[in-house]
Image: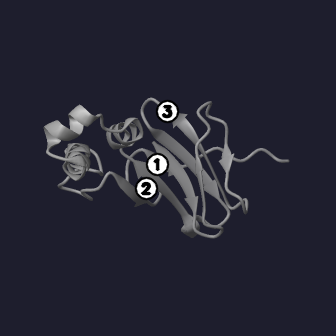
Amino acid sequence: MKALFCTLCLDIRALDPSGAWTVCRCGNLEARWLDPEKGTVRARAREQGHVRFIGLNNHYLIGAAKGATHGDMVKAGGQWEWWRQLHDQATNAEGYIFDKTKRSCWATIVKVGETSDIAWETEEKPAS
């Protein structure tokens, strides 16, 4: 999952799953899914230096939202151990920025162009 993050207004927003443009509160940044299945995003902004995205590892995000059963916690050796195991699994993500050889975290802040899946929009914005 990715969310836009404007450092001008400190707005964080999930991208519209239909591919429509999602705009930050101050209007500086807008972004859309180019292909949500591939995780590719396009962005445009008045002040590009204030554009960031928050990348969230889906394995961790879904596991954390689902939560652990009592059996899961017993098997892991306790609740904190279960959370550490979930984090460990999420950072075993070869080829992704979350991997232990890269940022080693299930959530990360990314600038446009730091990863191959986030780029600037190449088409002109339609006139209002």
The quarter of the displayed image where residue 19 is located: top right
- Residue 71 position, x and y percent, is 22, 32
- Residue depicted at x 54% and y 36%: 34
Q: Is residue 42 left or right of residue 87?
A: right
Q: Marks 3 and 1: which is nearer the front?
A: 3
- Residue depicted at x 64% and y 44%: 123
Does residue 40 show up? yes
- Residue 68 position, x and y percent, is 30, 38
- The residue to which callout 3 is attached is 36
- The residue to which callout 2 is attached is 113
Q: Of the residues under marks 1 and 2, which one precedes in the sequence?
A: 2
Residues marked 2 and 3 touching at CB (< 8 Å): no
The kind of residue on which mark 3 rests is Pro
Q: Residue furthest right?
A: 128
- Residue 80 position, x and y percent, is 23, 52
Residues marked 1 and 2 touching at CB (< 8 Å): yes
- The residue to which callout 1 is attached is 118
